[in-house]
Amino acid sequence: MTGLPVVDTTVWSNFAHAGDPTLVTTAFAGAASPREVLDEIARGQRLGFIGTYDWSFIRGDTSASITLPDELIGPTSPPFSTTV
C-alpha cells in the first residue's frame, strides 16, 4: 500500500461503537480523514449518535480525496421525483 489510508466516517463510527475509536490508528497506521469526515463525526457526536470522545488524534488531511469509477457513482440525479 502506498500513501496514507484514508478512513471514512463508517470506520470511525464502528470503532467508536465498539468502545475505542483510537484502535483505528492501530489497524490502519497513519490513518487520515478529509475535513468533511471530521465535520460529520462532530455532527454525530453533537446529535448523540456516537459517544463523546476526544477525536483530536485523527489526522485531518484536507488533501485526501477519493476518486470513484463512474460505474460506482451511479446516476447524478435522485431516482425519485421531488415534485408533489
Image (cartoon, rainbow, N blue to C red):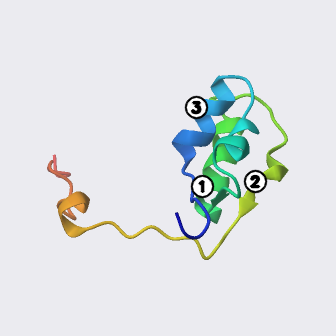
| Residue type, mark 2 in image | Ile
- Point out the tag, 2 or 3, that comes first from the N-terminus: 3
Residue 68 is drawn in which quadrant?
bottom left
> Residue 63 at x, y = what percent?
61, 76
> Residue 34 at x, y = what percent?
61, 64
- Point out the tag, 1 or 3, that comes first from the N-terminus: 3
Examine the rendered structure and indicate whether residue 17 appears above or below residue 73. above
Callouts 2 and 3 close, C-beta under 8 Å: no
Q: Is residue 54 left or right of residue 23?
A: right
Question: Could you say which is closer to the camera, residue 82 or residue 62?
Answer: 62
Q: Which residue is mark 1?
A: 37
* Numbered disc 3: secondary structure: helix
Q: Which residue is mark 3?
A: 14
| Residue type, mark 3 in image | Asn
Question: Could you say which is closer to the camera, residue 58 or residue 44?
Answer: 58
- Point out the tag, 1 or 2, that comes first from the N-terminus: 1
Q: Residue furthest front?
A: 1
Q: CA distance from mark 2 to mark 3?
A: 15 Å
Report the residue at 60% width, 55% height from top.
Answer: 37
Q: CA distance from mark 1 to mark 3?
A: 14 Å
* Numbered disc 2: secondary structure: loop
Question: Could you say which is closer to the camera, residue 1 or residue 20?
Answer: 1
Report the residue at 72% width, 46% height from top.
Answer: 25
Q: Which residue is mark 2?
A: 58
Question: In this figure, what is the number of numbered marks?
Answer: 3
Label 1 vs label 2, nearer the camera: 2
Examine the rendered structure and indicate whether residue 21 appears above or below residue 41. above
Is residue 82 visible to us here? Answer: yes
Q: CA distance from mark 1 to mark 2?
A: 10 Å
> Residue 29 at x, y = what percent?
69, 53
Q: Badge 3, how many Cα within 10 Å: few under 14, some, many 20+?
A: some
